[in-house]
Amino acid sequence: MYLALTTTDPWICDPVGNLWSRSSFAINQVTVAPKVGPMPWTPNDAEKHTHKAVTTELRELWAKVANERLEKTGDEGRAIREANSVVARQSGGGT
């Protein structure tokens, strides 16, 4: 969520809920959809991001988690880290 300033209202409310007068701007909420790339990851992409996805099932799990997290957050790096973490736990942990 982002906050946008506009000049449509002479009143402003701060995050605590206090109303301020004689202001030349108001704060409006603006939501921005996360940026998602055009192509989701495939199980074959797991090999490029983690050495723990040694089975077909783990590679499929990696792709599923990575794509779900990318869709939810729009952050590729976070999606990869979370997918790697899930695969590491499923494969027995360790480094």
Image: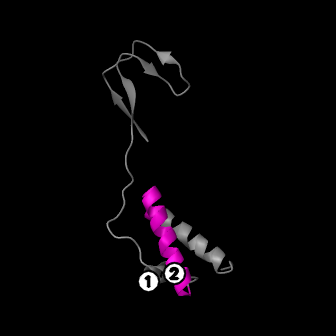
Circle 1: residue type: Asn
Mark 1 or mark 2: whose residue is earlier in sequence:
1
What's the residue at 55%, 82% (across, down)? 57
Residue 9, above or below 34: above
Q: Which residue is mark 1?
A: 44
Quarter of the view holding residue 37 = bottom left
Of 18 and 68, which appears nearest the observer? 68
Relative to 18, does residue 54 appear above or below in the rendering? below
Query: Looking at this view, is 7 or 67 the one in front?
Result: 67
Label 1 and label 2: CA atoms lie apart by 7 Å
Structural crowding at the residue carrying mark 1, measured as other residues with C-alpha within 10 Å and reported as few (<14), some (14–19) or many (≥20): some
Q: Which scheme is used to colour this image of the protein? A: one colour
Quadrant that contains the C terminus: bottom right
Q: Secondary structure at mark 1?
A: helix
What residue is pinned by disc 2?
59
- Extent of the magenta region: 54-76
Looking at the image, which residue is at 54% across and 70% down?
A: 83
Predominant secondary structure, magenta span: helix
Which residue is at 48% across, 83% downward? Answer: 47
Q: Position of residue 12 (x, y in %)?
A: 43, 20
Q: Is residue 27 visible?
A: yes
Residue 55 belongs to magenta span:
yes
Badge 2 marks a residue whose secondary structure is helix
